[in-house]
Amino acid sequence: MAMLTVEIDKERDLPVLQALLNRLGLNYRIDDEDWGGLSDAEVEGIKAGLEDIKAGRIHSHADVMARIDKKINRS
């Protein structure tokens, strides 16, 4: 058995490709979330980070650097 990975325009190409694969009698699965081989824990960490961004739970680079500089200067 072999696996074929194809990037397509989901809206335009997917219905045509599914019809073709069905007509050929081939088994297939559609993976809408290609995470490039990352582990489940890595994917969950990224998703949690994206949720933090949406919720505004972030610190800018400038803010973090200012806090670090302040701590260094106190030492």
Image (cartoon, grey):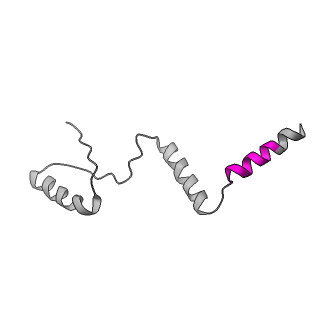
- Answer left or right for 3 relative to 71: left
**Residue 73, quarter of picture:** top right
Q: Residue at x 51, y 43 (%)?
A: 42
Q: Residue at x 45, y 41 (%)?
A: 38
What secondary structure predominates along the stretch shown in magenta? helix
Residue 23: give x, y in percent of width and height: 10, 55
Is residue 73 shown in magenta?
no
On the image, the x and y values in percent for residue 11 come to: 27, 63
Residue 26, horizontal then vertical, whole percent: 15, 48
Task: Answer with left or right where residue 75 lies relative to residue 45.
Answer: right
Q: Residue at x 69, y 54 (%)?
A: 59
Closer to us: 38 or 74:
74
Q: Is residue 75 left or right of residue 4?
A: right
- Front in this rendered view, residue 57 or 25: 57
Residue 19 as seen in the image, left or right of residue 29: left
Picture quarter with the C terminus: top right
- The answer to which image quadrant residue 4 occupies is top left
Whether 63 is among the magenta residues is yes
Q: Residue furthest right?
A: 74
Please count the marks in the image.
Answer: 0
Name above or below for residue 27 compared with residue 19. Answer: above
- Spot occupied by residue 56 in the image (x, y as percentages of width and height): 64, 62
Numbered range of the magenta stretch: 59-69
Quarter of the image with the N terminus in it: top left
